[in-house]
Image (cartoon, rainbow, N blue to C red):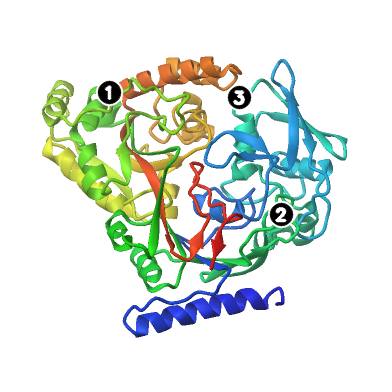
Amino acid sequence: MTFLNLPRRALLAATAATALALSVGGAAAQTPENVLIVGQIAEPQALDPAAVTAVNDFRILMNMYDGLVRYKDGTLEVEPALATDWTISEDGTVYTFTLREGVTFHDGSAFDAEAVKFNFDRMLDEAHPYHDTGPFPLAFFFSSVESVDVIDPQTVQFTLNGPYAPFLSNLAYPTGLIVSPSAVMEHGADFGRNPSGTGAFTFGEWRSNEAVVVQANPDYWDGAPELETVVFRPITDANTRTAEMLAGGIDLMVEVPPVALSEFQGDAYTVHEQAGPHVWFLILNAKEGPFADVRVRQAANYAINQDAIVNDVLEGTAEVAAGPTPPAFAWAYNPDLEPYPYDPDRARELLAEAGAEGAELTFYVTEGGSGMLDPVAMGTAIQADLEAVGLDVTIETYEWNTFLGNVNPGLEGKADMAEMAWMTNDPDTLPFLALRTEAWPDKGGFNSGYYSNPEVDVLLDAARVETDQDERARLYQEMQVIVQEDAPWVFVANWKQNAVTSDRVGGFSLQPSFFLLLDDVTKN
């Protein structure tokens, strides 16, 4: 089979089979053997790790690229990948990696220390000729890197500006994936449409709003995948995605709507669930308006019936959140922290104390986005709960990118509250980027509600440079207690991600990282 003909035929066969199934009243279609059709939630923004931020895109990238390290299967623990081992200096500022020998990029160029240096210089050096990768790069994950030096072709050294405990975990995140310098130099700004990595699958083609097609890399250093081809289809409407899965037009569906889970009972399907480092919350504008008063912020937490949202709206696909740190980070999570109880009477008392009865609130809600669960239904339920304690809530609804364009620059002068969800790789990431005073939007962070507590700032600054994990855990657990009391957010839910596979798919499991790893998957 030729390079392009296989995926074209695979996709055409799947599309034709789906059309046939729908025309005969839903009889199961048969997608091609060894070709996995994945129903994604959206079109990817790019296929360049330096240019994207969405989990939707990461699910594709993690199958085409590798990092120096990766998360061990089923965990958030780091293990070797393109680096076979590493050493850390006593002061925690120098990391020296030994690289895997004999690895090549999909375009045939060599993976070596120069390639690693090129990747991080491209990301961190604004003067680098290929630095400009898009409007929302995640280069801040590596802002602690002072220099990357080639020791020899198989050894590369990172020097940090100080100890930075999340460094290895960040290297396992998609921002740390290694791309081919030759391909970047050949395609320039179009590299995101012409990707080349070292991963289990090679890029085949990308037809906008139709499919991204990848093929098995027979020379993959960790063993060739079982599948010949994977087709990632963007199906943004959840009901359409569900119908395609039921008709047999796709083999794997991610982010199954809670109301659709009952459709996939029985031997023809397997429903997969996996808790991960996710938190869904409401950002409260702590700088101005009613939520500048901590009593009103606490009242909102008491007023919202989280159990009803989790059980009735999300149909048990999440757990009630107790604070800013997801319990998936077991070592750093504070198990003594209890969620705010549903207590509308206490909420009314606090509103009366603050003189905020009848306050008018503007509430930003999004139509959808990765990790946002069921945001319109959740927003409507939250509006009803807040109005039940005497607040006057007006919802403004936006599509995801417009929503982010309104929320990320800060809520000042615009809104009192906004939905948000984060999926992170380390207990440092979310609070450091969204709860510190230095993370206010005008300072480059995502603290869109302008929360500020000097004690929290000190704890977070100390935790990210602490190399003893037990002491790091103590600092994070203390931070969680303070933040819960200050209530800069309404802590709503921790998502249990889900997916559905057909009975023809084997070897699939969801990862706590939320990545979609397909190198061990089979399809008969």
Q: Residue furthest right?
A: 152
The residue under the point 70% across, 50% down is 222
Task: Kindly indicate whether the residue at mark 3 contacts the one at mark 2 (C-beta within 8 angstroms).
Answer: no
Q: Identify residue type, mark 3.
A: Ala
**Residue 121 sits in quarter:** top right
State left or right for residue 279 relative to residue 506: left
Residue that numbered label 3 is attached to: 165
Q: Identify residue type, mark 1.
A: Val
Please tell me which of labels 2 and 3 falls first in the chain.
3
Task: Rate crowding at label 2 as few (under 14), some (14 to 19) or many (20 or more) other CA atoms within 10 Å.
Answer: many
Residue that numbered label 1 is attached to: 294
Q: Nearer the viewer, residue 478 or 81?
A: 81
State left or right for residue 316 relative to residue 450: left
Q: Position of residue 174 (x, y in %)?
A: 60, 45
Please tell me which of labels 1 and 3 falls first in the chain.
3
Residue that numbered label 2 is attached to: 197
**Residue 306 sits in quarter:** top left
Q: Secondary structure at mark 3?
A: loop
